[in-house]
Every structure is written in structure tokens, then in C-alpha cells.
Image: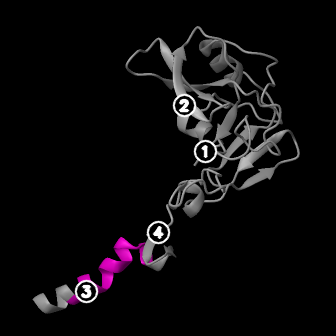
Amino acid sequence: MKRSILMILLVLMPSVIFGGGHGKTYGTTKFTDRTGVVKTGQTTVYNAGDDGTYQTGLAFDYTDNGDGTVTDNNTSLMWIQHGNLRGGTTNWAEAINYCEGLNYAGHTDWRLPNAKELHSIVVYEGAAPFINGTYFTNTASSYYWTSTTYVPNTTYALFVLFNRGTVGGGSKTNAYYARPVRGGP
């Protein structure tokens, strides 16, 4: 009985550890793709072993819906393509109100994205703004609000800074851009 359990574990463990054999081999080391995590978009190798070397994760996969929106096929999120649809910057509360009151492309369930959602469309290759300019047009190399409050100081909310591709926190009274999103998994 103990021998049977041990044999089953020896057969199943490589599948658990290496994701059922779905992975890539670099040199003599096998790595599994981080399914569900999108690639950074960095394809240039600046140093052996960096992100450009391995390029793990899911490829960016967008569909232009032909109505001013784009769907991220990895996350099922629908984005408004134009990065300055509102026509300027606004404080955090107004950004939320603007997105939730929007009627665009036949949809009224728009909202301000959370930090992970907005950061998921950052591309770490090329020049600022760090975003796919084919699908996401008119994006300012600037700050974009997220709906995520910064917990250590709740008078702050998180933003994505597209001229660096980073996430940070700023006072909710600051004036930043808003990029509406809808849907999700």
C-alpha cells in the first residue's frame, strides 16, 4: 500500500511542480509559463536572465471592437480606446463619477479601473507612454486614476503613471486622467 502511494506521488509530482509538462526550457532549467499573468511586453534583452530573455506569461491579446472600445481577451475587460475622452484631468471622486455616469458605445456600466486592471495594459517596451498605441490612442504620458484607495493614507488613491509604467499614490484632490473600463472575469 505504501509503495503504491509513493509510486502515485512520484508520477504526479512532476505534473504538479512543472504544470503538467507545459513549460519552456532555457538551458537545462525548465520553467512553467505563469498562466494568467500577462507578459510585460519587454522583448529587448538588456542583460542575460532579464525579462526580455524569458518573456514569460500570456501575450497581449486585444480586439478592436470597431466602436471606440477594445477588449482585452486575457482579462475580458473592455476599455475605451481614447485616453483622454473626458477632455482633461480631474480629481479622484469626479473621475469615479465620470466613469460611472458614462454612456459610451451602447454601454452604461463603465467604471474606473482598479490598480491591477489599469496596470495590466502597461507595456514595458518602446517609448512613453508605455501602452500599446495601436489599441489605446491618445494616452497622455501622465497619471491615470485607479479606483484603488491607498490604505495607509485613505486620502490618497493609486494611479498608473504611463510615462514610466509604474503605480503610485497621490492625493485624491490631485487632477489626473481617467480611462474607463467595464466587465471582467
Q: Which residue is label 4 attached to?
A: 32
Q: Earlier in the sequence, mark 2 or mark 3?
A: 3
Q: Which mark is residue 102?
A: none
Q: Is residue 70 above or below residue 110?
A: below
Cα distance in 3D space between marks 3 and 1: 38 Å
**Helix, strand or loop under label 1:** loop
Mark 3–mark 1 contact, CB under 8 Å?
Answer: no
Q: Which residue is label 2 attached to?
A: 167
Cα distance in 3D space between marks 4 and 3: 22 Å
- The residue at 66%/55% (across/down) is 44
Span of residues in magenta: 7-20
Q: Residue furthest right?
A: 66
Does 12 appear in magenta? yes
Q: Earlier in the sequence, mark 1 or mark 2?
A: 2
Type of residue at label 1?
A: Gly
Q: Which residue is label 3 attached to?
A: 8
Q: Earlier in the sequence, mark 4 or mark 3?
A: 3
In the image, residue 122 lies at what x, y percent? Answer: 65, 41
Mark 4–mark 2 contact, CB under 8 Å?
Answer: no
Q: Which residue is label 1 attached to?
A: 184
Type of residue at label 3?
A: Ile
Cα distance in 3D space between marks 4 and 1: 25 Å
Q: Is residue 56 visible?
A: yes
| Left or right: residue 154 compared with residue 17 | right
Q: Earlier in the sequence, mark 3 or mark 1?
A: 3
Mark 1–mark 2 contact, CB under 8 Å?
Answer: no
Q: Is residue 114 above or below residue 152?
A: below
Callout 3 crowding tier (Cα within 10 Å): few <14, some 14–19, many ≥20: few
What's the image's color scheme? Answer: one colour
In the image, residue 87 lies at what x, y percent? Answer: 82, 18
Type of residue at label 2?
A: Val
Question: Nearest the camera: 141 or 80?
Answer: 141
